[in-house]
C-alpha cells in the first residue's frame, strides 16, 4: 500500500515514514499541500496521512479540493491543535478518521490496518468507503453513556458497539448527523470514566454512530484493550 504522508515538520515526517515502512507499506512524503496534490497525480497513493496545519495551503483546504474532485483515496487527518469545528469539518469533507497528535505506534498500526482493509474492499467491490459507513471493526459492548449537547443539555443512552475511534449509542434524544456531543462513559476497567467530544456520523436503525474527535492516547489504549478482548480471536 502506498501511503502519502503530508507533514511539514521533517522529524515527524521521517518518523511517520519509518513507521509506515516498518509495517510493510511504501511511504511517500510531501511537505506541503501543493506538493501533495502533485503527488496524488503522479504516484496515485492508496491512502493519505494529512497534517491539518501546513505552510501555504492548509490541510482543510486540501480536503476541500479532494472533496470537489471526488478523490477516492482515503484521508486520515492528524492534528494536535485543531478546534472542534475544524475536526468536524474534516470529517464532513470526507476524511475517514481524525486523530489528535501525538500519534502512538498502536494508533498508527491500527490506522494502517484500517486503510489497507478499505483498499482491499475498494478493489473487490469498485466502491469507495465513506464516513457514513462503518469505519473500523467494532465490538458489541453495552455501556451506560451520558450525552451532552452544545447547549449543555444532558441525557442518557447505551452503547450498542464500540471501537477505539467511535461508538454507536441508542438514546431517546437523537442528534442530527453532523452535530457534536460530549460523551461520558465508564469502560469498567478500573480507571474511571472517559469523556470525549464526538461527531454524529450517521443515523442507523439501532442507534447513532459517533466518531471521537479528541480522544487522548491513554483513553485510546483503554478502548483498544476493551475492544480487542471482545472481538473474535483468529484461529
Image (cartoon, rainbow, N blue to C red):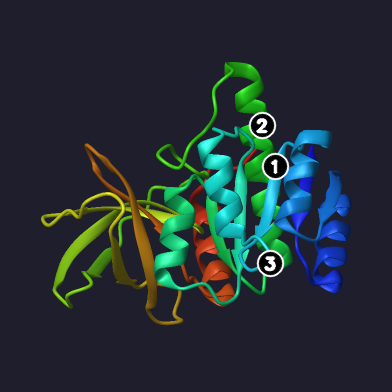
Which of labels 3 and 2 is toward the front? Answer: 3
Question: Which element carries disc 2, helix, strand or loop?
Answer: helix
Provide the residue designation for mark 3. Answer: 54
Vertical arrangement, residue 158 with respect to residue 28, above or below: below
Sequence-wise, the earlier of marks 1 and 3 is: 1
Q: Does the residue at mark 2 contact the one at mark 1 (Cβ under 8 Å)?
A: yes
Q: Is residue 86 left or right of residue 204?
A: right
Q: Residue lying farthest front?
A: 56
Q: Residues within 10 Å of mark 2 (few under 14, many from 20)?
A: many
Quadrant where the image shows the N terminus: top right
Q: Position of residue 200 (x, y in %)?
A: 32, 54
Residue at point 69%, 47% (across, down): 48
Separation (CA) of disc 1 from disc 3: 18 Å
Question: Which element carries disc 1, helix, strand or loop?
Answer: strand
Residue at point 17%, 75% (across, down): 151
Q: Is residue 191 left or right of residue 157?
A: right
Q: Is residue 35 left or right of residue 233?
A: right
Vertical arrangement, residue 233 with respect to residue 187, above or below: above
Provide the residue designation for mark 2. Answer: 119
Q: Is residue 177 left or right of residue 230?
A: left
Residue at point 63%, 68% (across, down): 53
- Residue 196 disc label: none
Quadrant where the image shows the C terminus: top right
- Residue 47 disc label: 1
Q: Residues within 10 Å of mark 3 (few under 14, many from 20)?
A: some
Q: Does the residue at mark 1 contact the one at mark 3 (Cβ under 8 Å)?
A: no
Amino acid at each position: 500500500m502506498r501511503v502519502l504522508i503530508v507533514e511539514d515538520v521533517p522529524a515527524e515526517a521521517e518518523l511517520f515514514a519509518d513507521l509506515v515502512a516498518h509495517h510493510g507499506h511504501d511511504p511517500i512524503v510531501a511537505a506541503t499541500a501543493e506538493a501533495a496534490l502533485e503527488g496524488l497525480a503522479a504516484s496515485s497513493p492508496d491512502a493519505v496521512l494529512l497534517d491539518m496545519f501546513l505552510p501555504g495551503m492548509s490541510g482543510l483546504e486540501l480536503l476541500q479540493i479532494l472533496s470537489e474532485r471526488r478523490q477516492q483515496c482515503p484521508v486520515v487527518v492528524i492534528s494536535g491543535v485543531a478546534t472542534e469545528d475544524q475536526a468536524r469539518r474534516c470529517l464532513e469533507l470526507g476524511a475517514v478518521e481524525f486523530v489528535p497528535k501525538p500519534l502512538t505506534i498502536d494508533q498508527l498500526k491500527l490506522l494502517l490496518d484500517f486503510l489497507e482493509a478499505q483498499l482491499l474492499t475498494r478493489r473487490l467491490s469498485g466502491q469507495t468507503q465513506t464516513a457514513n459507513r462503518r469505519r473500523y471493526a467494532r465490538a458489541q459492548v453495552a455501556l451506560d453513556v451520558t450525552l451532552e449537547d452544545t447547549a449543555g443539555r444532558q441525557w442518557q443512552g447505551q452503547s450498542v458497539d464500540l471501537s477505539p475511534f467511535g461508538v454507536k449509542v441508542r438514546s431517546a434524544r437523537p442528534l442530527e448527523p453532523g452535530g457534536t456531543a460530549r460523551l461520558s462513559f465508564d469502560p469498567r476497567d478500573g480507571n474511571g470514566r472517559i469523556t470525549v467530544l464526538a461527531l454524529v456520523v450517521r443515523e442507523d436503525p439501532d442507534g447513532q454512530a459517533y466518531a471521537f474527535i479528541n480522544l487522548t492516547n491513554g483513553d485510546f489504549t483503554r478502548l483498544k484493550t476493551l475492544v480487542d478482548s471482545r472481538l473474535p480471536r483468529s484461529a
